[in-house]
Amino acid sequence: EVQLEQSGAEVKKPGESLKISCKGSGYTFTNYWIGWVRQMPGKGLEWMGIIYPGDFDTRYSPSFQGQVTISADKSITTAYLQWSSLKASDTAMYYCARHPSGTWSYFDYWGQGTLVTVSS
Amino acid sequence: QSALTQPASVSGSPGQSITISCTGTSSDVGNYNLVSWYQQHPGKAPKLMLYEVTKRPSGVSNRFSGSKSGNTASLTISGLQAEDEADYYCCSYAGRSPNWVFGGGTKLTVL
């Protein structure tokens, strides 16, 4: 069974750094692109970027380029989303989601989400 | 890249059919048959309902169907059921590096 298990909720202060995770299981982790999607409180979904764990090829949405870093550790089948200096506006739910093999056309499996709260 | 345009809300009675539209541009919806739809219940992760405009993943009811004309895609739910009440988001591939754009979401209320 394919599963994407995300790390738990985080409460941080502005200016702090953060790295959240998404562990894939039930499939060959290195063969599928994984993306990150933001959902701000009461708002819609926004695509942030994707990574191919097989060769670490990473692509970012222009809206998020330079704001976050996406990485992966294939030895532990885990993808990451990190911030070096959080802002209050980073408060949101963050989902990881997988693209099916051989296509970018949709996201077939989603993690349960990680709630990030940034407040002084 | 602007979000795709969806109605904020739609409603229908059990057994009825409803349609949710998703309007983009010639750079996304109009240029690719790569529109997908996601259902999101409160506090839950999105769930794939349709992909590549009309295709249903295994396990999704055939009450859900999709179509596209020009820059507008549509999701139709027939035989509405109480459990269909949720938020629905469309998503289109938008080419470039790559890029995906989502709709703003539509809240479906089953009366």
Image (spheres, coloured by chain):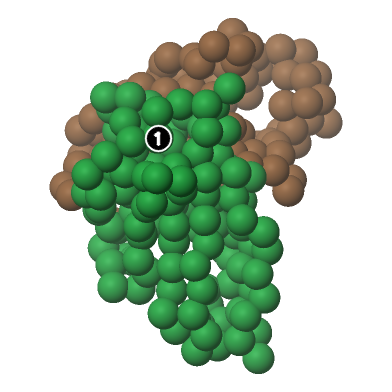
Question: Which residue matches tag 1?
Answer: A29
Which quadrant of the view contains residue A103? top left
Residue at image position (35%, 66%) is: A69
Instruction: Determine the image quadrant of residue B70.
Output: top left
Residue B9 versus residue A16 in the image, above or below: above
Name the quadrant containing residue B59: top right
Q: How many numbered marks appear?
A: 1
Q: Is residue B68 visible?
A: no
Q: Is residue B16 left or right of residue A19?
A: right
**Crowdedness near tag 1: few (<14), some (14–19) or many (≥20) residues, C-alpha within 10 Å:** many
A94 is higher (above) or lower (below) than A69: above
For the point 78% across and 26% down, which residue is it?
Answer: B83
Q: Looking at the picture, which amino acid does disc 1 mark?
A: Phe
Return the residue nearer the eye: B45 or B85: B45
**Residue drawn 55% across the image and 39% down it:** A4
State the image coordinates of residue B45 (x, y, percent, origin top left).
63, 42
Q: Position of residue A99 (x, y in %)?
A: 38, 33
Name the spot of residue B16 as percent of width and height, x first. Answer: 72, 16
Query: In screen coordinates, is B24 left or right of A114?
Result: left
Q: Residue furthest front?
A: A75
Residue A53 in view = yes
Residue lying farthest to the top in this orientation: B62
If the image is split into quadrants, where does the N terminus of chain A sit?
top right
Name the residue located 27 percent from the left edge and 39 percent from the top edge: A54
The chain drawn in brown is: B
Q: Position of residue B69 (x, y in %)?
A: 32, 24
Q: Nearer the viewer, residue A48 or A68?
A: A68
Residue B108 sits above or below residue A120 on the image: above
Q: Quadrant of the C terminus of chain A?
A: bottom right
Chain A hue?
green
User: Which chain does tag 1 point to?
Assistant: A
Q: Secondary structure at mark 1?
A: helix
